[in-house]
Amino acid sequence: MSESITATNPSRTPDPRRWRVLGLVGVAQLMLILDVTVVAVALPQLGADLDLPRATLTWVVSGYTLAFGGLLLLGGRAADLFGARRLVLAGLLLFVAASLTAGLATSAPMLLTGRVVQGVAAAMLSPAALSLIVTIFDGDERNRALGIWSALGGGGAALGVLLGGLLTAGPGWAWIFYINVPIGLVLLFTLRSQLPARPAPATSVRLDVPGAALVTAATAALIYALIRAGDHGWATLATAALLLISVALYAAFVARQRRAASPLINVRLLTRRPVATGTLLILVATALMIMMFFLGTFALQEQYGYGALTTGLLFLPSTLSTILGANLAGRIIGRTGARTLAVAGLAVAAAGLAVPAIWSGAAAMVAGLTVAAAGTGSLFVVASATALGQVAAHEAGLASGIVSTFHEFGAALGAATASSLAAVSLAGTGTEGFTRGFTTAAIVAVVTAVAALAITPSARS
């Protein structure tokens, strides 16, 4: 019988290097998550230096998260088939090279190429690293390790805004990419000596590359529809056509998974209630978080006139709030249950997002986003624990890839939605776009809270 994620295997001797490995791959994951939001504060300066329009600036965020999310299922499957160690090291090396390319960019194509390749590398590294954690920890230690991992995901995204402000105001926006080079190389050589070499699993199963292409293309069409709607309107034939294309491609992906000899995912895994609930929560939590940072950084700089450094510092309370929310959730989820904590986290997020939607002023915005960050931070822990809590050990890489996929799709969709809703404000012709964006985010949090109350498994189940 397969070992459960929450089960303890008393016959297995714990790996003495497990906490050291967690620290190293945790730093690597933090680097990947930082790169989702580290560009947020730099976008206005980056756009001015390279003469980039709003749509291209949105793709600087979404291009990374789209490639990251679109190929994560492939990365999770590859970790199961070829070994997590190989994927971690190869992903780190590619991420370093792509970061250098993005930092050296002098044009939109070069910058977007670097960002997309960064996403490809992240898709290799992230699920493999999480798979390592799931397999080297047991029982309560595994829950604590997943709590730390989740805190890195939520806190790292918030920390990215602060770091982006410091680097943009200091040596310049290129250093939000350059900083990955020395860190990535140190991690590469350290992990190479810390992770034991293992032979590749004996298998004839092939990777489902067509499946990965379909799900990536489907999400790209959806994101393009959202971005385009900001300039041309939502009720247009082109927007409707793009949405229909996205739906058709998603349907083709599901059909492909059902008939492929070596499917990218077992669709039945995604239909399990805990996994489905966890993926919904991670999607919404990440989308809300990115909307907060995208709208907040532009509003503070474009509407209220703050510089990049001050904007980054104003997000420090949100950074701390995210980490504290995730840490608290990791400590109490065993007592409260996932359902109660999910609804509470979404309610807190909705309340915080409503503040800048109702009241104007930088102080109200910072206070509201700090409250909202605590709610989204707790959701990361609830989502991971719910989705991964009852999968078998041999499915760990795949389940991890699914969770991480929805995390990055949430980031891509959040950036595209925020950019579209706030198009008028981003163009500098009004402030109502920021209000519309925060209002929509608060409504999404409320609707998801109602859904979570209905579908999240109870503690007993």
Image: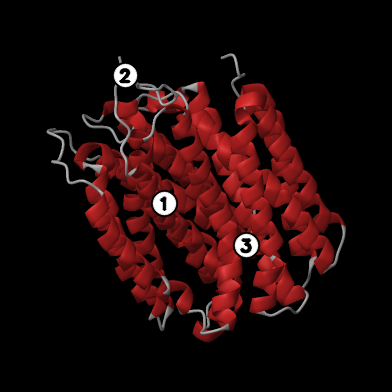
Secondary structure of the residue carrying numbered label 1? helix
Residue 253 position by quadrant: top left
Q: Is residue 271 left or right of residue 323?
A: left
Which of the two discs, 1 and 3, labels the residue nearer the N terminus?
1
Secondary structure of the residue carrying numbered label 3? helix
Answer few, some or many: residues within 10 Å of disc 2's Cα (few below 14, many 20 plus, some between 14 and 19): few
188 over 302 or under it: above or below: above
Which of the two discs, 1 and 2, labels the residue nearer the N terminus?
2
Which of the two discs, 3 and 2, labels the residue nearer the N terminus?
2
Q: Amino acid at mark 1?
A: Gly
Q: Nearer the viewer, mark 3 or mark 2?
A: 2
- Picture coordinates of residue 214, whole percent (x, y): 35, 44
Q: Residue at x 37, y 49 (%)?
A: 20
Q: Amino acid at mark 2?
A: Ser
Residue 2's label in the rendered image is 2
Q: Nearer the viewer, mark 1 or mark 3?
A: 1
Q: Residue at x 55, y 36 (%)?
A: 383
Residue 236 position by quadrant: bottom right
Q: Nearer the viewer, mark 1 or mark 2?
A: 1
Are the two marked residues, 3 and 2, in contact with CB atoms closer than 8 angstroms?
no
Determine which residue is flagged by label 3.
419
360 over 331 or under it: above or below: below
- Picture coordinates of residue 278, whole percent (x, y): 53, 33
Residue 23's label in the rendered image is 1
Q: Residue at x 53, y 67 (%)?
A: 38
- Picture coordinates of residue 413, whole percent (x, y): 55, 51
Answer few, some or many: residues within 10 Å of disc 3's Cα (few below 14, many 20 plus, some between 14 and 19): many
Residue 451 visible, this orientation? no
- Quadrant the C terminus occupies: top right
Q: Amino acid at mark 3?
A: Ser
- Picture coordinates of residue 179, whole percent (x, y): 43, 73
State the separation of the CA atoms marked 1 and 2. 27 Å
